[in-house]
Image (cartoon, coloured by chain):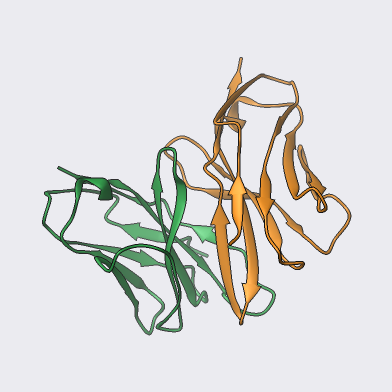
């Protein structure tokens, strides 16, 4: 099975712009979670989507949004970028139900805001 | 709210030696799961080992084992016979299931360097 893929791998944006990141989960996985990783802060949970519905949400401002499509692919959008949004954004997929709780991570998208 | 604390930002160990990474957590839940993830430099995060809170036996995966102390809310990772490929960032994670959903909380990580 193919692993979790994320595109693009690297992005450079300017303050005030918006950005969309994409995540394709492992085939058959219906849950996609997004995390922001910064040095010293570890992984901060953004949100989780399951079957096209946001099921969980972390403590991030409304500039961070996401969605999930019927094929379980997910996108994350950040509007009005700030310098502090520079980070590695990871997505993780899982079956998301029953006793299957393991998350599998993608390689991440490194976003640099200048 | 649940929290996960990794008090060792950086550690180093000689090749072939044993090293223990610490993790403590706080929760009022009785049923949860704990994980250690490894993130090698510029590479993907992978699951190293998992522990179900209801299991008293400590999990073991080859050279990796945990010391799970439920009452003390401690979950340390022991790496035996350290190898250069073990050089990575290690994250401790807590997960519990509420209302049919899963919520993961990660620690800030420990950067481990294995020295030749």
Q: Residue at x 44, y 44 (%)?
A: A41
Q: Is residue A42 left or right of residue A79?
A: right
Q: Colour of chain A?
A: green
x, y percent for residue B35 = 66, 53
Quadrant (top left, top right, bottom left, bottom right) of the N terminus of chain B: bottom right
Q: Residue at x 72, y 40 (%)?
A: B77
Which of the 4 quarters of the picture holds residue B38?
Answer: top right
Q: Is residue B100 left or right of residue A88?
A: right
Q: Is residue B2 above or below residue B22?
A: below
Q: Is residue A98 left or right of residue A84?
A: right
Q: Colour of chain B?
A: orange
Instruction: Give the residue furthest to the top.
Output: B116
Instruction: Give the residue furthest to the right.
Output: B57
Quadrant (top left, top right, bottom left, bottom right) of the C terminus of chain B: top right
Q: Is residue A49 above or below residue B17?
A: below
Q: How many marks?
A: 0
Q: Residue at x 38, y 85 (%)?
A: A70
x, y percent for residue A61 = 30, 64
x, y percent for residue B43 = 45, 42
Q: Is residue B98 above or below residue B17?
A: below
For the residue pair B57 and A58, the one nearer the viewer reads as A58
Q: Residue at x 59, y 54 (%)?
A: B3
For the residue pair A79 and B39, the one nearer the viewer reads as A79
Which of the 4 quarters of the picture holds residue B23?
Answer: top right
């Amino acid at each position: 099975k193919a692993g979790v893929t994320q595109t693009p791998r690297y992005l450079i944006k300017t303050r005030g712009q918006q950005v969309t990141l994409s995540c394709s989960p492992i085939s058959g996985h219906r849950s996609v979670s997004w995390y922001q990783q910064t040095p010293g802060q570890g992984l901060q949970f953004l949100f989780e989507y399951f079957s096209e519905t946001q099921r969980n949400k972390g403590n991030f401002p409304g500039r961070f949004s996401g969605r999930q499509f019927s094929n379980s692919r997910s996108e994350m959008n950040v509007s009005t970028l700030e310098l502090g949004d520079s980070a590695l954004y990871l997505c993780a997929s899982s079956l998301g139900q029953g006793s299957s709780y393991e998350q599998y991570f993608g390689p991440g998208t490194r976003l640099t805001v200048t | 709210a649940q929290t996960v604390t990794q008090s060792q930002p950086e550690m180093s160990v000689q090749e072939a030696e044993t090293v223990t990474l610490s993790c403590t957590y706080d929760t009022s839940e009785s049923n949860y799961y704990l994980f250690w993830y490894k993130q090698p430099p510029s590479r993907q995060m992978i699951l190293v080992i998992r522990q179900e809170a209801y299991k008293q036996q400590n999990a073991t995966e080859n050279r990796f084992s945990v010391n799970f102390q439920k009452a003390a809310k401690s979950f340390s990772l022991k790496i035996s016979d350290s190898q250069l490929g073990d050089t990575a960032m290690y994250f401790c994670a807590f997960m519990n299931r509420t209302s049919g959903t899963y919520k993961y909380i990660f620690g800030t990580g420990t950067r481990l360097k294995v020295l030749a």
